[in-house]
Image (cartoon, rainbow, N blue to C red):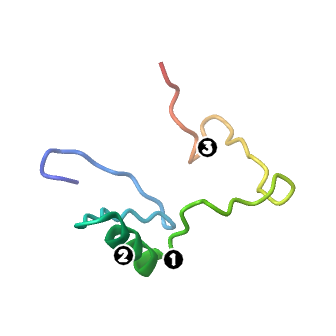
Amino acid sequence: MGSDGFTTPGTQPDLFCGIAGSADDVVFDTAVEITGFIDGTKNPSLSEAPKPRLVPEGRPGRPAACC
């Protein structure tokens, strides 16, 4: 919990890194070094991409209703 009371719920596989740098290449290189970050320029084809899954209502991981 942050000093302003803000919380970020997490699960075991979650990772959040806030990276700041003097230039975009510094930030990118740091992200690659920390997490093996891939910027999305090589997305899988539709036939290789994971299929979407729905989380049943009331189950962990289900987003809250919006609006």
Q: For the N terminus, give its image quadrant.
A: bottom left
Q: Position of residue 45 (x, y in %)?
A: 80, 57
- Would you place residue 32 above or below residue 62 in this image? below
Question: Label 1: which residue?
Answer: 36
Residue 12 percent across, percent down from the top left = 49, 67
Within 10 angstroms of label 1, few (less than 14), some, or many (20 or more) residues?
A: few
Asked whether 5 or 25 is in front, the reply is 25
Structural distance between the alpha carbons of marks 3 and 2: 36 Å
| Frontmost residue, 3 versus 19 | 19
Q: Residue furthest left?
A: 3
Residue 29 in picture, x, y percent from top left: 40, 76
| 48 is higher (above) or lower (below) than 58 | below
Mark 2: give few (<14), some (14-19) or many (20+) Cα within 10 Å.
Answer: some
Kindly indicate the quadrant of the structure image that contains residue 56: top right
Q: Earlier in the sequence, mark 1 or mark 2?
A: 2
Query: 10 Å neighbourhood of mark 3: few (<14), some, or many (≥20)?
Result: few
- Amino acid carrying label 3: it is Arg
What's the amino acid at mark 2?
A: Thr
Marked residue nearer the N-terminal end (3 or 1): 1
Residue that appears at 23% across and 45% down: 6
Q: Seen in the image, is 44 located left or right of residue 41?
A: right
Q: Nearer the viewer, mark 3 or mark 1?
A: 1
Specify which label sits upstream in the sequence, 3 or 2. Answer: 2
| Residue beneath the point at 74% across and 46% down | 52
* Disc 3 to disc 1, C-alpha distance: 30 Å
What number of labels is visible? 3
User: Label 3's element?
Assistant: loop
- In the current view of this chain or complex, which residue is farthest to the right? 47
Disc 3 marks which residue? 59
* Residue position marked by numbered label 2 in the rendering: 30
